[in-house]
Image (cartoon, grey):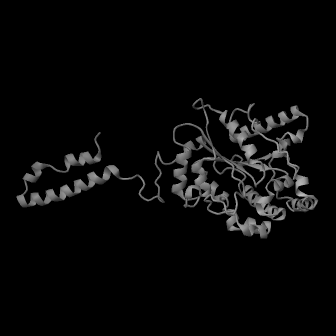
Amino acid sequence: MTTPTHHMLRTAVDVSQLRALSSTQGRFIAAILCFVIFTVAKIAPNRPLVQDNDKLEPDAEAVQSFSDRANCQIVYVLGVEGTSHHGVTPILETLARQQIDPATDSPYDVSYSNEHLRAALFGFHKETRTIDNESMVRQTIRKICPHNGQKHVIMEDASFPCGTDDDPRSYRIHRQWWWKQSTMEQIAMSDTALNHPTNLDLFYKAFSPYADIKFVVLHRPFIETIASRAEYDAIVKQHSVVIRGFMLLIRRFLDSHPVDNYTGNRLWTLICVEKIGNKYYGEDEERMNSSRQRMLSHLVDFFGWSRAECTDCFLKWKESRKNHLENLGKENVAMLIEHARKLGGIWPPQVENPLEEQKCSL
């Protein structure tokens, strides 16, 4: 293959021209040309595309072009601790894996808890660059959504907050001990909470030019939510404060991002976890299945997918058998009822024209 370097080697040194010069001139010019040719031949073939990692230039291999944004979809299952992430996300993953891309007639490439996305979002694997570092964003997109014409769906469901204050994972910002001694407003306004486990505003702003981002917001009745992870913040009262702080933080994000900046479609939707569970419907299995199917159809429409029938979607669903009221005790239950009242108008968030399955009870 002819390269610019080969062309230079052929044309830069014309022996007949050197012979036309005096012996002294010829030797001088030949030496200069040999130095230049040696330098170019050594460097040019191995010159990296990117020399400054913070100034990554866009190119066809390194960055997903805007026209291919629809082939890269990030689904974030968003909710506070205790809202059944590990029950809901497998439903969505199963639903995604049965989809067929009409453009290629091939299944979607589905990834759950992708290590590259987690490194970018949370700082895992000792990723020290900020979430909006442009080179990191583009490199992450290249990893999670390779430019191969296939539809990629990447799912993430880390809760807010996530982990413990001494968690060994390399979060950029860990859970903070002082949150337990604060108010929900102080938590929601703090830089530490706004960046734990990731900064939602910066995540959307940095990744949305290259990926179609969708948030599925989870709501579970407040007392059940607190009871399921009450030990995470030592005592029930402190855990309630922390969780309410993050409910307020998430609600403010949702209110400021109702639609996607690029398509104008809804950026987020809501799942009332109690209305996809068995317990809510008692012995009425037919009603439960109908409600679940309506929710699946809504999600398929929300994601822009095509196949809503999914007989296997709830195979991994496990109903909680805990008696939360009994476990908490009367005094804590009375306190949490009062805390729940303070969430009026804040949580749960409201969607336009909700399904019956999206009318959540606090």
- Look at 67% across and 58% down and name the residue there: 197
How far from the left and from the top, in percent, is residue 332?
A: 89, 61
With 34 as the anchor, is 274 left or right in this view? Answer: right
Q: How many labels does the image show?
A: 0
Relative to 149, say whether 192 is above or below: below
**Quarter of the image with the N terminus in it:** top left
Q: Residue furthest top?
A: 105
Viewed as shown, does residue 273 lie left or right of 153? right
User: Which residue sits at x=59%, y=50%?
Assistant: 117
Outermost left residue: 23
> Which residue occupies the foreground of this view, 308 or 226?
226
The residue positioned 64% from the left and 63% from the top of the image is: 173
Where is residue 262 drawn, in percent x and y? 63, 49
Residue 64 appearing in the image: no
Give the x, y percent position of residue 76: 68, 49
The location of residue 350, given as percent across then percent down, is 81, 51
Left or right: 312, with 272 as reference point: left
Residue closest to the eye, 317 or 32: 317
Can residue 97 be seen in the rendering of this structure? yes
The vertical placement of 97 against 250, above or below, is above
